[in-house]
Structures are given as structure tokens and as C-alpha cells.
Image (tube, rainbow, N blue to C red):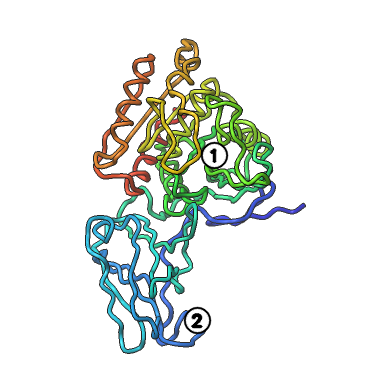
Amino acid sequence: MTKLRSYVSRAAMMAPLVLLTATGWTQPAQPAAGRGQGGGRGPAIVSPEVLPDARVVFRIAAPRAESVTLNGGDIPGLGGQGGTPAQFVKKENGIWEATVGPVTPGAFRYVYQVDGVRTLDPVNPRVSESNANCWSLFFVPGLEFMETRDVPHGAVASVYYQSAVLKTTRRMHIYTPPGYEVGQQKYPVFYLLHGASDSDDSWTSVGRAGFILDNLIAAGKAKPMIVVMTAGHQPAIAAGAPPAPAAADQPPPFTREFVTDVMPYVEKHYRTIADRSHRAIAGLSMGGSQTLDIAFRNLKDFAYIGVFSSGASLGGGRGPTAGAAPQPPRPDWEAVHKTDLDNAALKKGTKRVWLSTGLDDGLIANSRTTTELLKKHGFNAVFKESPGGHTWLNWRNYLSEFAPQLFQ
């Protein structure tokens, strides 16, 4: 079978069952004056348009609409981010327009609501997947560590594999460093997990992980590495739901799939250095708690552990929500993971445990408590409190700080 994938600056062949994407993107070019993006029909529309002063203009042709609003995701100062809604004005040609900002540098998701209907920007081809839907995407330059720079670029592939645990075909995104496809070198592996509202696409689209790694590697700040970005949600299967653990304190489905399906697939199909000192795992929010569960059930496999805006499920004793079927109490995290937490030999090989959470993040108390618990068990856990909240504005920064600590 012939397999093809697309690279930022070249094409090459590497691994089976891949759907091709690039490590990232820049803003699309504006159409020629007098021509629309629909083959010359209708007025020319550029949306979004990032102005030199970092203000952003959003436009959509909706001549029959009575209202247009904007859901701006992480865009600072907009709606749910502590500001006021974008004010759209309907022009005589039927194009609605709103200007926001200046906007903090970074990648941002957005969608329109046109007469109450959620609508992607029809003239912006850049999208980012979340758990339940898609978003239009734009980028405001200004932060060198995530820019599209003139450096060697790696590649990101959408990789499909069969999950024995979940009994279905699954997808993950895998970054390979510059030069991977033309050499025979083996590389360390960094498993990078997403949050509850996101998907395996999110770290490379809105998270810009490919560009962040490209820039760190080019600057000599990070070792060349393979980065595996898995799908953290388990889909409903034939029985109507993901398989349940055999007992409340047994590994959840994602942990079992990760160990049974994901890691063996990566080590079979990619040139990895398959030992503990060359494996790292980190995740944000839901992915942070998944990271802690995987790492401290399998500490023999991971020397580097990162937790972004998250912590362990501490305290146990959670009853059912109103109207829900009775559920067993959640087992206490410390008790469930006691074997690895108290293994003196495994502690010696744990090279980094790093946590970071924003001061305005509702999970910061749990992050602090988790850090102290790990210290109590003899781990040299480092916790960094950052400004800001539960947002990609922080998580991209955390990746850029954590990746240079790996495999040194």
C-alpha cells in the first residue's frame, strides 16, 4: 500500500495509515481587489483581517440576516473573556462587519451566530476541531516561540489505528521532527494529551505544537523528539457506551487503551528509543489528570511528567448527581496509585515532575494539593503559578517551557 503525507516544506513517506496535514499555518492571502473568494461572484470579503495594530476585523455576507454575533473562544476582552460582545454593523452590500482588539498574540478560535445559527466563517479555510464541533481559526503574530519562522520544519500526520480496548478505529496526531523521513536516527517520545473540550487535533491547530517544537529544536533549546497527541475521549461503541473498568479502582478505558494500543503502535511504526529515560507524558486539564493516572500506574515507563492546569482526583467519596443512576464512590487517587508512589527504585529514575496552573484558574487549588502530595511521597515536584486562567493563552506557554526540560 502506498502512503503519502504532506509536509510544510516537502513531501515524504513515513508511517502507515496516515491522513496528511502540515505542522501549522499562517494567515491566508487576501483575494485580489474586485474578486470574491467564491470564484468572482459577490463582493470581495476578507475575514478575519488582522490589522497592523493587532485589531481584528470579522466579516460575513448575510444580506437577509437580522442579527450576527461572535463567539470568540479565548479572545481576551471579548464576551465571555471579561469584555463586551463584538458589535456587528450591517453594510449596504449585505456584509456584516465587527472590529475587536487589539488582540493578544496567539491562535484563536471563533464562530458566528447568524440569526442564532452557529456558523463557521465561510471565507476562512482555517479550522480547529474540538470535542463536539469545529471552529474557525486565526492567528495574531507577535510571540516568536510560536511563529511560522524560517527554520527546518517537522511534520504532523493524522494517524489511524485499531483500538483493541475500544473495539473501534481511532485517530491520533503525531509530530516528527525535521529530518525524520530522510534518516535512520531513533528519537525520544513525548505523549501530549488534550483537555475535556478538545480533540487530538487541538494541540496542533489552536495549540500550534508543531511550530513551537520546530522553533525550540532550531534554537537548540529542545531535543528533536516525536510528539504523540492522542484522542482522550472514548466514543460509544456497540453496547452504547465505552467499556467500564472491571472495578472502581481499576484503570479507566483511556488508560487501558493508551498502554495496550497507543504505545505499542507508536513503538512499532516509528523509530523510537523505547526506554523509560526517553519517554515523557504531559497533558492539560482532563489530559493532566489522565497523565497522572497513566504515569503513576506505569512509572517504570516514564521519566518526565507534566501537568498543565490540572491535578489528581483527590479525596474520593463522590456521590451521584441529581437524577443520575447511582455510581460507586470515586476511589482516592493516592490510595489507587500507592504502589508506584512508594516505589523507591522508580523515584530515582523520575527525572522531572512539572506542574503549572494560572492564578485565575479554578483548578489551581487542586494543582497545589497534588504538588504537595507528590512531595510527601518523595518526588521533586515543581509547581509554577502563572498569570491567567484555564485557557490556551497559558497552555502554549506551558508547552514551550516544559519541552526544553525533556531528554536533556
Q: Amino acid at mark 1?
A: Ile
- State the image coordinates of residue 358 (x, y, percent, origin top left): 28, 40
Q: Amino acid at mark 2?
A: Gly
Asked whether residue 375 is in view, the answer is: yes
Element on which disc 2 rests: loop
Residue at numbered disc 1:
226
Q: Where 395 sits versus 95, above or below?
A: above
- State the image coordinates of residue 387 (x, y, percent, origin top left): 24, 42
Rendered residue at 52%/24% (across/down): 249
Q: Nearer the viewer, mark 2 or mark 1?
A: 2
Of residues 12 and 205, which is closer to you in this image?
A: 205
Rendered residue at 64%/40% (across/down): 166
Rendered residue at 45%/35% (across/down): 282
Residue at numbered disc 2:
38
User: Is residue 108 rendered to the left or right of residue 54?
Assistant: right
- State the image coordinates of residue 320 (x, y, percent, origin top left): 44, 36
Rendered residue at 60%/44% (across/down): 241
Q: Where 408 sits versus 178, above or below?
A: above
User: Is residue 308 rendered to the left or right of residue 181?
Assistant: left
Quarter location, residue 316: top left
